[in-house]
Image: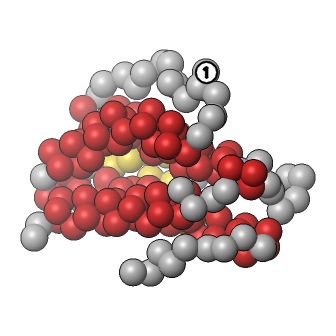
Amino acid sequence: MNENDLLVLNFEEIRRRSIKLWTSIPAEILDWRPDAEAMSCKEMIRHVLEGEYLYHQILIKHVDGTTIESINPYESKVFSTINEELEFSQPYRNKFLKFVKSLNTDDLTNIKIDRSDVGYIRELGDMLLRIAYHESVHTGQLLDYLRTAGVQRPNIWD
């Protein structure tokens, strides 16, 4: 197994567990939030899916100089159901994973992702791990949301 295989496996495992959690959230809980300043369950799910899309656009720009898309397809999309969100995001997810699979070992260390706008410059491999971590953190937050709301949580530790 090479670096790309491990990265893709990590992204797929994280998403599999996220989906297991997301699809267990009762519809009547999707708007629940622990306080007025927190994201709701559905806002957090959208944040993760949209975030992956936006991160991908940043990576594309830094890897091959392509201008990122000026239109964010998530901006005009109204959240309806978890399954619809997953269906909508799947083509973008496929492009992201295809991108990760196309990288070579040198790319992971030699390409720098400049996010000086938010305070860091990282190697591409590091940035990919940060993207995966972002989703993992929000999965943990949603597990806590469900616990706080008194909702049954799925076992994602299979």
- Height in image: 28 above or below 7? above
- Quarter of the view holding residue 88: top left
Query: Crowding near pointer 1: few (<14 within 10 Å), some, many (20+)?
Result: few
Q: Is residue 152 left or right of residue 18?
A: right
Q: Nearer the viewer, residue 148 or 36?
A: 148
Residue 135 in view in this figure: no
Give x and y (percent) for residue 85: 51, 39
Which quadrant is the C terminus positioned in?
A: bottom left
Location of residue 100 in the rendering, given as x and y in whole percent from the top left corner: 24, 49
Q: Is residue 27 left or right of residue 74?
A: right
- Residue 89 position, x and y percent, is 43, 37
Question: Who's the residue at 59% across and 49% down the image?
Answer: 45
Task: Say which residue label 1 marks.
Answer: 76
Q: Could you tell me if residue 105 is visible in this image?
A: yes
Residue found at x 47% / y 75%: 156
For badge 1, the amino acid type reads Ser
Q: Residue at point 25% right, 64% down?
A: 9
- In this view of the protein, which residue sits in the foreground, 27 or 34? 27
Where is residue 65? Give x, y as percent: 29, 28
> 14 or 126, which is in the foreground?
14
For label 1, the SS is loop
Q: Is residue 149 left or right of residue 18?
A: right
The structure's colour scheme is: secondary structure
Q: Quadrant of residue 29?
A: bottom right
Q: Disc count in the image?
A: 1
Residue farthest along the right direction in this orientation: 36
